[in-house]
Image: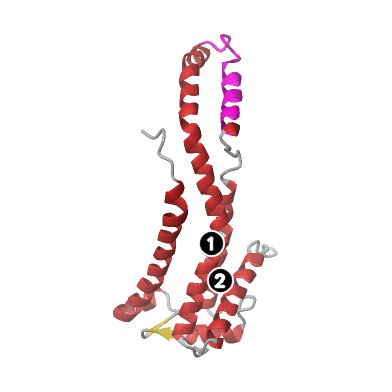
Amino acid sequence: MPALPDLLLPLKLLVAAVLAVSHDGLVGAGLAPGSGAAWALAIVLLVVVVRAALLPAVWHGVRTAHAAARARPALTQLRDRYAARLDAHRRDPARDPDALREMLAEQRAVQAEHGMSRLGCLPALAQIPVLVALYAVLTDVAAGRPVGAMDAALVASAGSASLLGAGLADRFDGFASTPGQGWAVVLLLAGVAAALSFATQHWFVLPNTVLTGLP
């Protein structure tokens, strides 16, 4: 049976190129090519670039949620206004057959008035392949598999790099053997991810959150 095509390959190649360029830039800035600091910072820069690239999708999601919040009171009133007619239609389908159609038409009008998109979830879904590609590239590098611009030499360099005494390519079972050092690396990278998530929420989500109409 022929192997299935790697649908994420274009994204993986792009992510690998960003990682390689980040490492080259840090080496150009004076860090040793095989040092753990160079590779750890390259991974941090990669995560920052990926999160920055996803900001338009995050912003679109915030705007969609904002529009939904503005429309919520009108939609609630609309459902309340049609509740009796829809209940009567459910009990007797022959009675008031136009109730649902009329309510849906008014609902679409309210959504359009407040700028709600019927495809509002697509930008959020589009983030998933990018994040999967990011994970796949880091997994390949940790396993010693070249991918795109991350050729065999760069992968070997990353595989031999260590930070605080722990190999950057180690898996969690490797960290368990050196808990003090290995988990320090895990906590460092987790802290960077948490800081980026906090910044996204603080500067893009919370200022545009609307609580009107919430219970």
Q: Position of residue 68 (x, y in %)?
A: 50, 37
Vertical placement of 171 versus 119: above or below? below
Q: Position of residue 130 (x, y in %)?
A: 57, 61
Q: Residue 137 bears which disc, if any?
A: 2
Q: 10 Å neighbourhood of mark 2: few (<14), some, or many (≥20)?
A: many
| Amino acid identity at mark 2 | Val
Element marked by disc 2 = helix
Secondary structure of residue under mark 1: helix
Helix, strand or loop for the magenta stretch, by majority: helix
Q: What residue occupies the far right of the structure in this picture?
A: 2
Q: Is residue 187 magenta?
A: no
In the rendered structure, which disc, 1 or 2, sits on the residue that comes first in sequence?
A: 1
Disc number for residue 32: none
Q: Is residue 105 a member of the stretch shown in magenta?
A: yes
Q: How much space separates mark 1 and mark 2, taking CA atoms?
A: 10 Å
Side of 5 where 179 appears, left or right: left
**Start-end of magenta stretch:** 92-111
**Disc sitting over residue 131 in the figure:** 1
The amino acid sitting under disc 1 is Leu
